[in-house]
Image (cartoon, rainbow, N blue to C red):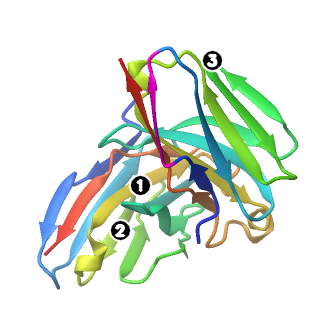
């Protein structure tokens, strides 16, 4: 099984450019999440989707938008990239709505904004 | 907001020794989870302990939870070179069960970087 797949794995942007990070899971999970990981900061939740058709803000949503395209796919969009958005982005999914269970993570997307 | 804080930030031990890392948190939780992250990879779930449990085992892993002290520990016995990784605790905060998962949700600590010397 592929699990959680993220694309692209690496991306370099200039300030002000836009891009979309794609995420897909093949485990028939209901909930999906986007986290960012910065050195010394651990993981911080950007947005999550408890079920198909719903999205909610996490701890650090500013500068991002998300789309739950269908049950499998959850994308993260940066409309106007800033250097502060240089980070490693992780998509994750879990079986049930809510948090009482295991998260399955993708391999990460490493974004550099110049 | 940071809920879990791991201690130590870094730990280096010899292969075969036991490794212990700790996690402290601030608010009441429903459960606490531990994850491992190998360099350049995604996080992998190791073990989940619920707030009404005190100890849980999985292979060479032993997790304890002390809700009165708001702390948890992860013990890896008979360490191997392949255990070299960063380890994170993550808490599901009590309030989120009723809010359906709010901004805090599953909150991760900053991690302990474990190095196993061969």
Which residue shows up at 29% across the image and 43% down it?
B40
Tell whether label 2 touches label 1 (CB within 8 Å).
Answer: yes
Q: Dividing the picture into quarters, in which one does residue A74 lie?
A: bottom left
Element at badge 2?
Answer: strand
Tell whether label 3 touches label 2 (CB within 8 Å).
Answer: no
Disc 3 designates what residue?
B59
> Which chain's residue wears label 3?
B
Question: In the image, is A92 to the left or to the right of A108?
Answer: right
**Inter-mark Cα distance, 2 to 3:** 37 Å
Element at badge 1?
Answer: strand
Which residue shows up at 41% across the image and 72% down it?
A66
Q: Which residues are magenta?
A: B9-15
Element at badge 3?
Answer: loop
x, y percent for residue A95 = 60, 45
Callout 1 and callout 2 share a chain: yes
The circle on residue A38 is none
Callout 3 and callout 1 share a chain: no
> Which chain's residue wears label 1?
A
The circle on residue A76 is 2
x, y percent for residue A72 = 44, 51
């Amino acid at each position: 099984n592929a699990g959680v797949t993220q694309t692209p794995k690496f991306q370099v942007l200039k300030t002000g450019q836009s891009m979309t990070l794609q995420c897909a899971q093949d485990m028939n999970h209901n909930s999906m999440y986007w986290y960012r990981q910065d050195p010394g900061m651990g993981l911080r939740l950007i947005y999550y989707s408890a079920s198909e058709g719903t999205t909610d803000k996490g701890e650090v949503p500013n500068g991002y938008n998300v789309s739950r395209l269908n049950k499998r796919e959850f994308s993260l969009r940066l409309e106007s990239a800033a250097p502060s958005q240089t980070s490693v982005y992780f998509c994750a999914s879990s079986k049930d709505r809510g948090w009482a269970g295991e998260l399955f993570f993708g391999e990460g997307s490493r974004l550099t904004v110049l | 907001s940071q809920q879990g804080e791991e201690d130590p930030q870094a730990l280096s031990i010899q292969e075969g020794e036991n490794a212990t890392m700790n996690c402290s948190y601030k608010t009441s939780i429903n459960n606490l989870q531990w994850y491992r992250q190998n360099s350049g990879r995604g996080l992998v779930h190791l073990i989940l302990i619920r707030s009404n449990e005190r100890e849980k085992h999985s292979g060479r892993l032993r997790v304890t939870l002390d809700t009165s002290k708001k702390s948890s520990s992860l013990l890896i016995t008979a360490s191997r070179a392949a255990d070299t990784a960063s380890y994170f605790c993550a808490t599901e905060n009590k309030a989120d069960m009723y809010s359906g998962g709010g901004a805090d949700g599953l909150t991760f600590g900053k991690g302990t970087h474990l190095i196993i010397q061969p």
